[in-house]
Amino acid sequence: MMGNKKDLLIIFTRNPVLGQCKTRLAASVGDQAALEIYKFLLQHTAAVSAPLNTDKRVYYSDRIGRDDVWDEKIFTKALQQGADLGQRMTDAFREGFEDEYDRIVIIGSDLFDLNEEDLAMAFEKLRLHDFVLGPALDGGYYLLGMRQYTPALFTNKDWGSPEVLKQTLSDLDGEDCYLLPPKNDVDVLEDIIDNPAFLPFIKDRI
């Protein structure tokens, strides 16, 4: 199912490997529960992004997956390239603009609060503004969209720290940027402990 050829949704994902995903969460719930939670989040992200009327490209952290939650009739697949998150996102956006997309939005794959309407809104706002940014409650961001290749947004950032949002907003000062509503991504037990959707994974831990 091909979408609007002018719009590209990039999804960054980690390969779901025991002991290698959601490590901060795993410190509270154990590696196996953290892996099952991450697989649940992958399924959610695939489900909410699949109906979107855009092209969709999944970038894997370590190796391109086959026969997984990312249906190859809906999602094209690629491998992240670069030494840190900034370099990997820079490379993905560069490829998208080289492929002549007009509007590109990137998300991760660990946001249960995200739905199809949020993604549609991001592209809608990107038709009216040069940049779209979705702030995360932990001081990062869960979504970034742009209409021109802007690698400066990915340099000089303390990736994984609560400073990333502030540093990115500083880069966007004076730019035409639309801010989406803040959302909570899933990093630690406190992010999911009050959400009934996660109770089957953590009921033995609380």
Image (cartoon, rainbow, N blue to C red):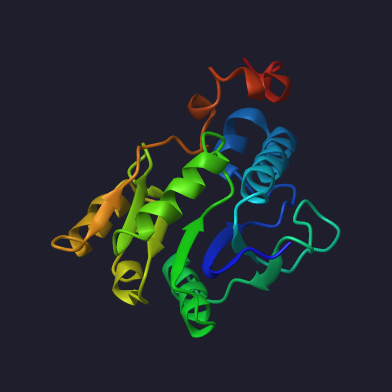
Q: Quadrant of the N terminus?
A: bottom right
Res 149 seen here: yes
Horizontal side of residue 118 vs 50, given as left or right: left
Q: Is residue 146 above or below residue 178?
A: below
Horizontal side of residue 50 vs 85, given as left or right: right
Res 60 seen here: no
Q: Is residue 45 above or below residue 7?
A: above
Residue 151: x, y in percent?
35, 76
Q: Quadrant of the C terminus?
A: top right
Residue 143: x, y in percent?
43, 52
Q: Is residue 106 above or below residue 80?
A: above
Q: Identify the residue shown where x is 18% and y is 59%.
A: 170
Specify the farthest residue to the bottom.
Answer: 98
Residue 90: x, y in percent?
44, 74
Horizontal side of residue 75 vs 83, given as left or right: right
| Numbered-mark total | 0
Specify the farthest residue to the right.
Answer: 67
Q: Identify the residue shown where x is 66% and y is 72%.
A: 78
Q: Identify the residue shown where x is 57% and y is 20%.
A: 195
Horizontal side of residue 5 vs 66, given as left or right: left
Q: Is residue 80 above or below residue 41?
A: below
Residue 29: x, y in percent?
64, 29
Asked which quadrant contains residue 189, the reply is top right
